[in-house]
Amino acid sequence: MYGLVSFVAFILMVQLYSLQVLKGSDYRDQAEKHYVTPQGGVFDRGSIYFKNKDGQLISAATLKTGFILIINPSLIVDPKDTYKKLSEIVDLEVDAFYNKANKKDDTYEELAEKLDEETAKKIEALNIDGVDLKKQKWRFYPGGELASRTLGFVAFDENVLDGRYGVEKYYDDLLTREGNDLYINFFAEIFSNVKDRFLEGKKKGEIVLSIEPSVQLFLESELKKVGEKWNTDSAVGVVLDPKTGKIYALAIDPGFDLNNFQEEKDNSIFSNSFVENVFEMGSIIKPLTMAIGLDTKSVTAETTYNDKGSLLIDGAKISNYDGKARGIVPMQEVLNQSLNTGVVFVMQETGKEKFAEYMLKLGIGEETGIDLPNETYGLVNNLKSPRDLEYATASFGQGIALTPVETVRALSALANGGKLITPHLTEGIKYRVGLARELLYDDGDQVFKESTSEEITRMLVEVVDKALMGGTVKMEHYSIAAKTGTAQMAKEDGRGYYDDKYLHSFFGYFPAYNPEFLVFFYIINPKEVKYASSTLTEPFMNTAKFLINYYEIPPDR
């Protein structure tokens, strides 16, 4: 008997918790409708949070509450008087009002929405027959444009209001709240199936992102300056932890105001090229080629070759960016001077089959698993070609097309001891049942030896210290490993390259031998400038200095 009483008491406690805490806001909404027409369901959706460096949650996407002004035209006695009184409180377009108010066979028309409580009380006090209010909730983004292309938004898809683009779309099932009948018998609710209710609550929740709002804001400001200075088609940047894949910021310029946008036929402003587009990345692929040569012991940093400025492969001429010969040069200078002929030499010493095997092991040509919708994968058929030419061009980042997120994952392996990571935005989920879960991401395959990661890092530190902008950007107390990339952009029809359109890219990580951050930029079609060192060195260094100061990173040299 005692056991039965205890069991019933437990059931009551669980269900009372569900009613009072989990569904408390729903019942409060219903209670607040004492002067509001309880017509139709009220939009509800789980929140999304940023997380600052101190672990505090900052609202990224939430709900705002207000009211819709509605009329029942069949009950409006004096449209002129009604308009006069309402227009003193709410801005109403006169012709639109009369068009709706004169529909005498109609019982429902909306006049205005997103009204605050003070305005609603003034309207209620008028006590006009045929005039009413309906509770309304809508998606609100406190940051406005902040992380707009990463967050995405909520909008109607035909008659369904759901997540469109970004995190809102990727986690739509988890964030969506389905309406429930709040008038269900109280005792029936108490004794309904506890297990089903608990499991249902575990499928619904709120998202905690790893995006740090101050870092995101800084990155967006740098991209905006780059975009304006060089009149780019688009500018993109990401800051992540190369050891874990945690993304601190992901920004695309231009962005848009999440609280005030208009969907049109061309919705490219909402898409995310970081995961949805592929590019021939150019010279930032060279460190990967060099690391493959180091890992297979095909070359060392001291290995030399005779640079003649160009070479012929399968009847095609491959040249350095300036066409000039350097004579006998070591592998370090291949990176310092970004020599196409040098990385072709590394590929040849490695062997094209082994080179292709490593490139594919780095995850190019496959999805990374990042928690964003519409991820595509790279075009790497050239790494299966019977000809030598395709492997040669791939060694310096042309002829194969990668998504930027694939590129970042591969480059992270240079920084983190040689392993693949899963780039991700979500740190945890707060379930509606009151539980929380931190998301864990497994390490991927070990592609390079740790010694290879250390050696390629040393070589890339020398690139910054001695070669990048003539060594003028070297930081005295911090080691930075970095490389620029400039790539011709392929024509849309696939027939050759534009002579005047380039993709500029820049990646770097620091402190180099135990990196906290990897920063990656790319800009599409900058005008009247040819090389990425001219466009992206300054924003990269500005971002590095900001992160070092903001996170109080101790010096490493």
Image (tube, rainbow, N blue to C red):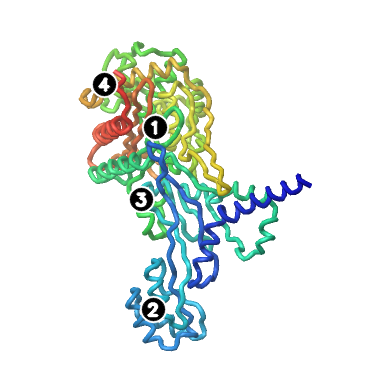
Q: Nearer the viewer, residue 400 or 402?
A: 402
Q: At which x and y percent is residue 374?
A: 49, 46
Asked where in the image residue 70 lies, by quadrant, the reply is: bottom left
Q: At which x and y percent is residue 502?
A: 31, 38
Q: Which kind of residue does numbered mark 2 sit on?
A: Ala
- Between circles 3 and 2, the one closer to the viewer is 3
Q: At which x and y percent is residue 92?
A: 35, 76
445 shown above or below 226: above
C-alpha span from label 1 to label 4 = 35 Å
Tag 4, which secondary structure? loop
- Between circles 3 and 1, the one closer to the viewer is 3
C-alpha span from label 4 to label 2 = 67 Å
125 shown above or below 264: below
Crowding around mark 2 (Cα neighbors within 10 Å: few <14, some 14 to 19, many 20+) is: few
Q: Which kind of residue does numbered mark 1 sit on?
A: Gln
Tag 3, which secondary structure? loop
Q: Is residue 373 left or right of residue 144?
A: right
- Between circles 1 and 4, the one closer to the viewer is 4
Q: Which kind of residue does numbered mark 4 sit on?
A: His
Tag 2, which secondary structure? helix
Tag 1, which secondary structure? loop
Q: If you read the primary sequence from the N terminus, does the residue marked by circle 4 or circle 2 appear first?
A: 2
Q: Nearer the viewer, residue 206 or 411?
A: 206
Q: If you read the primary sequence from the N terminus, does the residue marked by circle 1 or circle 4 appear first?
A: 1
- The residue to which callout 2 is attached is 96
- The residue to which callout 4 is attached is 477
